[in-house]
Image: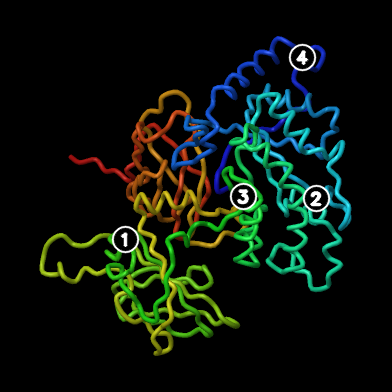
Amino acid sequence: YSLSFPLFLLPTHIPHTDNTLSPSLFLGLLLSQLNLFQRLSRKLGLHANNSQFTLAGEPFRILGGSVHYFRVPSAYWRDRLMKAKACGINTITTYVPWSLHQPERDVFNFQTQLDLESYISLVAELGLWVILRPGPYISAELDLGGLPSWLLQDENMRLRTTYPGFTDAVNVFFDKLIPKIVPLQFKKGGPIIAIQLDDSYGSYAKDNRYMAFIKEALTSRGVSEMLLTSDLSNGLKAGGPFKSATPVNMENLPVNNKNGQSQGYTLYETTITSGGLLKSGDNVRDRVFVDRRYIGFFKRNTLEMAVPDGEGKRTLSLLVENCGRVHRGKDLDKQRKGLVGDVLLNGTPLRDFTIYSLDMKPSFIDSLYRAQWKARPEVPLYPAFLMGALFAYGYPSDTFVKLPGWGRGVVFINGLNLGRYWSSGPQQALYLPGPFLNSGMNQIIAFEEQEADYKIQLEDTHDLGMTADIK
């Protein structure tokens, strides 16, 4: 998720003799949270940096769980929310199902079981926060993902795009919905601290203008709290692309105030329409992909490789890493990195590149936290950025990060670069100083070039690889 937080499974009941919270326990929970509500300034809402959330300028940890008002009998709302709170949850997330609230074009229902305003007000009464997910598409295991089926009366309908027939319908629904939730936002004294735009659009992504439309549809109607998504692209292209007809080396990329790129990776992509023989001319020594599938590695003594045949237009990618410039000798002025000359396919130079600067500097890693992320597909494509979370109790000590089953890449903890890892070794663990870790939630980002096991191990001893006794 673009902004992740732990989700907890809600039990059907809390162990208690009468299956309810004791008045004294609930009163204590409620008064504690109400005191927090009263104490907070409402000028600053939820904010995220690379290591933590803040609410009203104070550190804030989201312990979130979903209780969908439209799936729980309204008579049980209070009971279920109290039980959620007793689990330690401080933030309730809920979808808003368009198809239920507007079952017909001219019929709207916000009553009884669908009384969203009463539900959110009850959440606030119990001292909980809200992350609202108003869609318009919500997935949520609902028919058509919560979109009303009458949209399909239009034979040309293109759902979840900026097709006018869809956007007009969204605007009509939001004209009814958004005025109900605006007064319930945090900065207006309510419990809503964040609002999600649509749902998992990165896995759909038919229209690159769609998410901007949804954002404008919300903000223009008065939504002012943090906006987030649970969709993503894998962050690989967060570096800000630019176009060039010919290759451009790292040092001449128009980045970093036109000072070029000094470190990290650069991704060069172009379109091909056939397979054949690819020749590097020793102008690149790195990895080659076709449609994000690895096909080979140019090296000092490997200057050619076969590009498999395929149908139609395909994307050929060259991922180039700066492994370091020499620091002495006669070749100091020959240390340009990236794609330093032409690469030929069947004797013709590749042209019309889209180039991404992935310099791995702190500012670049910070930008990844603001990127739109998506859930990992069953068959991931590489190279890719992958994000996870680590919860540490107490005062974290020094530890060592191991990545068995991963290939080659870089690891970041809370925006700090731990270094490169490579399954070839010899070193099999990266040192992680205790001060780099937060007591509580920690963000982990890994850039993996070829393959990943999606599990990271923390060990209390180093692993320097193969060792030998010296006599």
Nearer the camera: disc 1 or disc 3 = 1
Q: Which residue is mark 3?
A: 230
Percent across and percent down for residue 97 are: 78, 48
- Give the residue displayed 88% in from the left and 56% down from the top: 106
Alpha carbons under labels 1 and 3: distance apart: 30 Å
Q: Earlier in the sequence, mark 1 or mark 3?
A: 3
Q: Which residue is mark 2?
A: 142
Percent across and percent down for residue 116 are: 78, 38
Alpha carbons under labels 1 and 4: distance apart: 60 Å
Q: What amino acid type should be assigned to the residue bearing mark 3?
A: Ser
Which secondary structure, mark 3?
Answer: loop
Left or right of 264 in this view: 225: right
Q: Which residue is mark 4?
A: 16
Q: What amino acid type should be assigned to the residue bearing mark 1?
A: Asn
Q: Which residue is mark 1?
A: 256
Which secondary structure, mark 2?
Answer: loop
| Quadrant of the frame with the C terminus | top left
